[in-house]
Image (cartoon, rainbow, N blue to C red):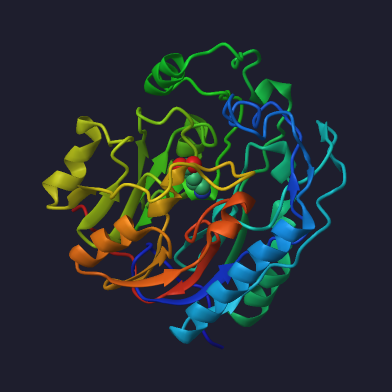
Amino acid sequence: MPKIVNSWNDFDPLKHAIVGRADMSVIPPEEPATSEKVPVDSEMRGMWGPRPTETVEKANAQLDNYVKVLEKHGVKVDRPTPLQWNQEIKTPDFRTESGMTQMPPRDILLTIGNEIIASANSFRCRYFEYLAYWPLMNEYFENDPEFKWTQAPRPRLTDKSYKHNYYDEKISLEERLERTANKDFVTTEVEPMWDAADVMRMGKDLFIQHGLTTNRKAMEWFKRYYPDLRVHSVNFPGDPYPIHIDATFVPLRPGLIINNPHRPLPVEQRKIFEANDWQIVEAAKPAHDNPPPLCYSSVWLSMNCLVLDHKTVIVEESEVYQAEQMDKLGMNVIPVPFRDAYAFGGGLHCATADVYREGSMEDYFP
Ligand code: DAV
C-alpha cells in the first residue's frame, strides 16, 4: 500500500494537501480566549452569528479556485467535511453558543513525518473543529499502513484555563506590547494548549510560538512527545496579538526565512539561525492598510504564503510588494486571489494543511 502522509517542513515539494472550506462558518461569541484576541477597535467586537451567505459563497469561490491552481501544479487536494457550526458547543466543563469554521486546517492539523496530530486549541468554539477532518484522517488510516492518526490531549478549557480580567477595554497598545514582551498571555498553565499554526516545522527542529494560542505547557508536551526532535520556544515581542507564527516568521527554502519587520525575532533567539548560516530577511510591506471586513487577522497575511517547492511560492494576487520581494529572492511566484477568504481564518498558508511533501527529516541546525 502507498505512503500517503509525509511532511517535515514547509518548503519541500508539496504533493498532497488539505484545503479548507468556508461553509457554515460562524463568527463565534466572545469567550475567555477570544475576547482577548479581538482588537478593541475591531468592528467584530461584541458581534457574533452565522457569517453572511454572500461572503461564504465568495470565500468558497476563491478556495475552489485555489484548489484548481494547486492541482494544476501537481498537488492532490482533499477537502474537509463541513459541520453545522451554528449550534451550541457543550462539554461537561463548559458551554458556548457556537462553533466557528473548518476554513483554516493549518490551525488544527500538524503533520510531522508520517503523523498528523489534531491540536489542543484554546478557543472553546473550536473544540470540535477536528471532526471536519476525521473522514480524511480515517481514509489515510485505511490506506496508509504507516500513518499515525493522533489527537493531542484534549484541554478541558474550564475557567481555570484563562486569566480573568486579563483584558480591559482601557488597556493601551503599549501595555499590550509590554505583556507580550513579558510573555504574559490570556491562557494559564493548568494544561497544555496549542494551535497547530503556532508550530513551524523544520525537520529535526520545531519552532513554536508562545503567545495567545499556545502556552508553555504545550512546549513541554512537545518535548516529551517527540524526544528525538528539538523544541524551541520562540516569541515576537513586537506583536500585541501574537497568534500563529505564519504571518510572522515564514521559511521559503532551507537557509531563508522572511520575518515580519514589526515582529522581529529577538537577538537571543536568532543565534541558532545565524550559527547555521540561515538568512532572516525582513518581509515586504503589505499592499493593504486594512484587513478585509469581518476579518480577525492583520494585514500581514501578505506574507502568509504557501511554498510549493524551494523555487515556487503562491502569494496572494494583490500583494504586489511581497510578490516582488519573492521574485528578488529567487522564487517563482504564482499569484492567487484570496482576500475574500481571509475573514474565515487566514491566508493561503492557513487555508491548507500538509499531507505529503517529498523529503525526509533533515537536521538544518547541527
Ligand atoms: O498577523 O493576524 C494571522 C495568522 C493566522 N493564522 C496575524 C496573524
Q: Residue furthest bottom?
A: 1
Q: Position of residue 83 (x, y in %)?
A: 80, 59
Q: Position of residue 255 (x, y in %)?
A: 19, 58
Q: Is residue 227 above or below residue 48?
A: below
Q: Is residue 331 left or right of residue 349?
A: left
Q: Is residue 180 above or below residue 235?
A: above
At 71% from the left and 53% from the top, the residue drawn is 101
Q: Is residue 361 left or right of residue 119?
A: left
**Residue 296 falls in which quadrant of the image?**
top right
Q: Return the residue nearer the eye: 284 or 227.
A: 284
**Residue 182 falls in which quadrant of the image?**
top left
Q: Position of residue 301 (x, y in %)?
A: 45, 50
At 37% from the left and 33% from the top, the residue drawn is 235
Q: Is residue 364 above or below residue 308?
A: above
At 58% from the left and 23% from the top, the residue drawn is 188
Q: Return the residue nearer the eye: 177 or 118.
A: 177
Q: Return the residue nearer the eye: 221 or 160.
A: 160
Q: Is residue 85 left or right of residue 352?
A: right
Q: Position of residue 318 (x, y in %)?
A: 42, 60
Q: Is residue 236 above or below residue 149?
A: above
Can residue 141 be seen in the rendering of this structure? yes
At 56% from the left and 88% from the top, the residue drawn is 1
Can residue 245 be seen in the rendering of this structure? no
Q: Is residue 43 left or right of residue 114?
A: right
